[in-house]
Image (tube, rainbow, N blue to C red):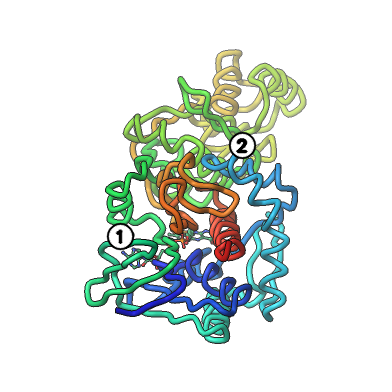
Amino acid sequence: MKQYDVIIIGGGAAGFFAAVNIGELHPNLKVAILERGKDVLGKVKVSGGGRCNVTHAEFIPQELTTYYPRGEKELLGPFHTFMTGDTMGWFEARGVPLKIEDDGRIFPTSNNSQTIIDCFLNEADKHNVDVLTNQSVISFEKINTQWSISTKTDQFLANKLIVATGSNPKIWSFLQQLEHTIIKPVPSLFTFNINDQRIKDIPGVVAQNVTVKVVDSKLESSGPLLITHWGMSAPSILKLSAFGALELAKRDYKFDIEVNFINQEFETAFSDLKDIKQDLSKKTVFKATQFDLPKRLWKTLVLSADITEDNRWADLNKIQLEALAGQLTKAVFKVDGKSTFKEEFVTAGGIDLKEVNFKNYQSKIHDNLYFAGEIINVDAVTGGFNFQNAWTSAYIVAKNIDN
Ligand SMILES: Cc1cc2nc3c(=O)[nH]c(=O)nc-3n(C[C@H](O)[C@H](O)[C@H](O)COP(=O)(O)OP(=O)(O)OC[C@H]3O[C@@H](n4cnc5c(N)ncnc54)[C@H](O)[C@@H]3O)c2cc1C
């Protein structure tokens, strides 16, 4: 039986951040990470397309919370303790320079997630954290004041136990046996599958300023939209998938969306089109792209409005102008299923927020049991916010573990 002051289950982002900060803030504590895989930090490695989007350039706590469909209210306090600026300072103080990209995402300047992994491994080594791989935890229980942890091969004892196993169904169901409530997990951050003639031949096209609404729902979001081989992606869609994670799961990922490609009212677009008809009467509609749309998107929307390739603006009747304004501002598409967004995907659901004390991330049900990272029912839109949740929760556990 191996004895530690603190055992962390899970050698991922949250587990490592907790371990190395405990090592630094409480050097007297003996800490171990138990990781089921033969390697640690697997998701960090593949994250952000291999570049690891560590956080996001949003430095106001209230604003930062709005990126979290689950956890918005609860994260406000924690972000006052450790948020994006702290994350940047933490990495830079340990020799990992970061850069902010135009869209606010923050990456190591190396553009390589291995830099982050190397930093964590060095820190763990420096602070004598035992990193034990091939240790799949199968159960843990309280024996008097200590936690007894069983893996497939070994037995451990610890005064404090931190569970940072991400979206792991086995650990969630095990925690249910320990009287914790688990909010049913559903995917978040996915792209929409759409089989529609209008977009079939234009994968790769991006419209920059789009609003997407789910029909018969309050769900709505704005931002860039990317046409893919399977349907639609990019921030406008990913935000909907995150904020609508539960509702869209209930609809079994079959629903209609209304896309406004130019972010204008129908009436305004119709009136603009009437003006364009006057101004460009001799030009062919198909070739005279308007509203700063990508050419290929304009062409497909024109054809969908029953306008032919050689129609001139002067040829258009009211019905055609209305049809084009409709395609531009309220084009309906049928979504049938979802696909994984490979840059980043997360799971909504996990330990009920009501059962976690957000001052120290301790379980409200069991003393000396803590949680960090995606295991809790917190998740965010894409852009570095999910890692920020891992860093914030892990840092706060580390800071308070000695109390
Ligand atoms: C492809 C992809 C790319 C992503 N890119 C980004 C990004 O760029 N930016 C961003 O903010 N977020 C990104 N995310 C989300 C981010 O990776 C997660 O939110 C984050 O990793 C959660 O950290 P965690 O430590 O809670 O869980 P994880 O990183 O999943 O770590 C959990 C660890 O626990 C271990 N474990 C599980 N069960 C057991 C057990 N029984 N015993 C022992 N060990 C166990 C697992 O093997 C794993 O190592 C991405 C996700 C994916 C899938």
Q: Residues within 10 Å of mark 2 (few under 14, many from 20)?
A: many
- Which secondary structure, mark 2? strand
Q: Residue furthest right?
A: 279
Q: Quadrant of the C terminus?
A: bottom right
- Vertical position of residue 51 compared to residue 346: above or below: below
Q: Position of residue 199 (x, y in %)?
A: 45, 40
Q: In this view of the protein, which residue sits in the foreground, 245 or 396?
A: 396
In this rendering, the label closer to the viewer, 1 or 2 = 1
- Vertical position of residue 27 compared to residue 164: above or below: below
Q: Quadrant of the N terminus?
A: bottom left
Q: Quadrant of residue 28?
A: bottom right
Q: Which mark is residue 141?
A: 1
**Residue marked by disc 2:** 222
Q: Amino acid at mark 2?
A: Ser
Q: Residue at x 30, y 46 (%)?
A: 176
Q: Residue furthest left?
A: 152
Q: In this view of the protein, which residue sits in the foreground, 264 or 188?
A: 188
**Residues under labels 1 and 2: Cα distance?**
47 Å
Q: Position of residue 377 (x, y in %)?
A: 46, 45
Q: Residue furthest front?
A: 144
**Upstream in the sequence, badge 1 or badge 2?**
1
Q: Position of residue 70 (x, y in %)?
A: 51, 41
Q: Quadrant of residue 209?
A: top right
Q: Indicate which quadrant contains ligand 1.
A: bottom left
Residues tagged 1 and 2 counted as in contact (Cβ below 8 A): no
Q: Residue at x 49, y 46 (%)?
A: 356
